[in-house]
Image: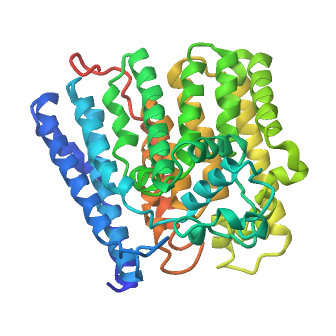
Amino acid sequence: MNVYRIASIVPRLLSIPTWNATRGLAGWRGPEARIWLLAGLGIALLLLTIGGLALHVPGAAGTVGTLERTEWLVVLLGLAALVHFVAVATVLRGVPSGTVWLVVMVALAARIGPLVAPPFLSSDVYRYAWDGRVQAAGVNPYSFVPADPALAALRDADVFPHVNRAETAPTIYPPAAQVLFAAVGWTLPGVTSVKAVMVAFEALALGAAGVVLRRTALPVAWIVVWAWNPLAIWAFAGNGHIDAAAAGLLAVALMLAGTRSGLAAGVAFGAAILTKFLPLAAAPVFWPLGRWRTVAATCVTLIALYACYASVGPRVLGFLPGYGSEEGLTDGTGFWLLAGLSHLATLPRIATGIYISVVAMLLGALGLWVAFVKCPSTDREIWRSAGLLMASITVAISPHYSWYFVWLALPAIVAPSRALIWLSTAPVLLYLDPFHDRFIWPSLVYLPAFALALVDRRRPLDLSLPTPGELA
């Protein structure tokens, strides 16, 4: 399939006004009838997932096999995203309490195939498995690049040949992630084991969100926002990205925040930060919880985890200092907004500094407002505020890796919003880059998100009072 045909077809598919189209569901007589629609959508999701797996060329690592197959995969993922949107709209309109088991069964079934299949949309999981193997051998993972002769005895034919940046970069993953990799390396080493651990953390995230939904008398079936998200299925069961662990730990921290358990929430939050640094953006929601106790617990957790690997000194930061340059964050080419402005005029070198400074001030002001003005105290306020902060930092850094967006589905479970649901799903498009440009194709993700954010502000989803019989 020609890439430019994809460029014209997929936007039209994803521009279908899903929320308006699902108003036709009103014709269904009661929530009991909608479960049949949901079952059909679940079957469609499973078939699309199987179709995506069938596209992979056996033996091709880190890629589907050909550009044409990648294009078709993105088409299938786009269709799966549409199925997901309709499923979410169906559940939010109200379904019987037992529907949560249908949601769980489809979610598990959809993950079996990607879990046992080799990863082919990213090679990151091979680095995770390698870091675990290095630690199982008693070596600090920050000490050497994988290709260093000192680690030659650890090389194998299954993992090492697929480790990315093997000759140039030490590991970038922070200490909490390394603890997980080490646990796999010491017990059941291998890529599939890493992916299984990430699926387990998905379950942890959904379990924590489910506790909050039950605690706030909301339908537990709302976990469909994450559970049927095709991007989550492919990113975690399929490719084992560490973001699942960060989201699981953050979900536990947010769940504990609603119980005013400041110390425990601080420990979970600190572990989330050192699994993948992005959860730090949610820090302001924890400030009203326990003040200095929560802050102290978070800081102690950070120090303790870094102390586990401090033998290498400053090298404990790994590849992190070089990551900004590689991803275009240092020269500004990686930021979606600056990439767009560069199409209009040649930007001065100072533009990147101005952008980073303005974003830092805006995010700082937003964080202060959440912590000291809004002061979220109820579960839904905490999760809604976390979603605002998480979406703001994600859009600001505008990553071109699709799996960076999945964590936005977490707050959307408890505090659903159109913008968050879109942002956590639509980046399936980013598995393709037809124009090799950081603005044009990503605009299919960002521009609708801004429009939906405006709709959310003017007409938020009023889902706080489910009808009798819809409570889980």
In this view, 383 is above or below 338: above
Looking at the rendered image, the quarter that the C terminus falls into is top left
Farthest-out residue, right:
313
Looking at the rendered image, the quarter that the N terminus falls into is bottom left
In this view, 18 is above or below 461: below
Q: Return the residue nearer the eye: 239 or 389.
A: 239
Image location of residue 387, percent across then percent down: 55, 38
- Could one spot residue 282 in this view of the protein? no
Which quarter of the picture shows residue 9? bottom left
Q: Residue at x 80, y 29 (%)?
A: 299
Image location of residue 410, percent across then percent down: 49, 38
Image location of residue 270, percent across then percent down: 70, 32
Q: Residue at x 16, y 35 (%)?
A: 35
Image location of residue 414, percent across then percent down: 44, 29
In this view, 305 is above or below 171: above
Left or right: 346 as drawn, with respect to 404: right
